[in-house]
Image (spheres, rainbow, N blue to C red):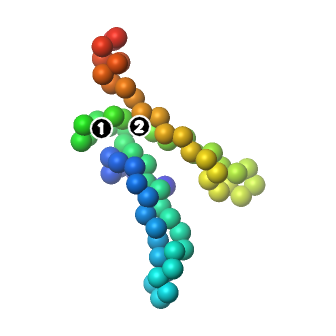
Amino acid sequence: MYGHIHAEQYQVQRGIVLEEPIGMNFIVGSATTFGHKPPSFNVVYLHPDTLLPIEYETYRFDLDHANKFD
């Protein structure tokens, strides 16, 4: 998992010779307001035996609400 591009996205990695999918990158959002997007963070749940991701949640901050009721 990678971060700091200020947007969530995923990338499919392909093999060099056969160009078949061999993996993926999940790029998470940013905890900044760059690009007028709300700050966010992710929680990733891993399988206890394999440590492979099995679920994730994304949380975004509502800055307008927070600033209104500061």
Q: Which residue is mark 2?
A: 40
Q: Left or right: 40 with respect to 57? A: left
Q: Are marks 2 and 1 in contact (CB under 8 Å)?
A: yes
Q: Residue furthest bottom?
A: 17
The structure residue drawn at horizontal position 41% and vertical position 37%, both measured from the top left corner, is 40
The structure residue drawn at horizontal position 39% and vertical position 29%, both measured from the top left corner, is 61
Toward the viewer: 9 or 2? 9
Task: Indicate the amino acid at tag 1.
Answer: Lys
Disc assigned to residue 50: none
Residue 20 percent across, percent down from the top left:
51, 80
Residue 14 percent across, percent down from the top left:
47, 76
Q: Left or right: 51 with respect to 15? A: right
Q: Quadrant of residue 41?
A: top left
Q: Secondary structure at mark 1?
A: loop
Other residues around mark 2 within 10 Å, as few (<14) / some (14–19) / many (≥20): some
Disc assigned to residue 37: 1
Residue 12 percent across, percent down from the top left:
46, 67
Q: Secondary structure at mark 2?
A: strand
Image: 1 above or below 42: below
Q: Residue furthest left?
A: 35
The structure residue drawn at horizontal position 35% and vertical position 18%, both measured from the top left corner, is 66
Residue 25 percent across, percent down from the top left:
47, 61
Task: Indicate the amino acid at tag 2.
Answer: Ser
Q: Residue furthest top?
A: 69
Image: 2 above or below 31: below
Quadrant containing the C terminus is top left
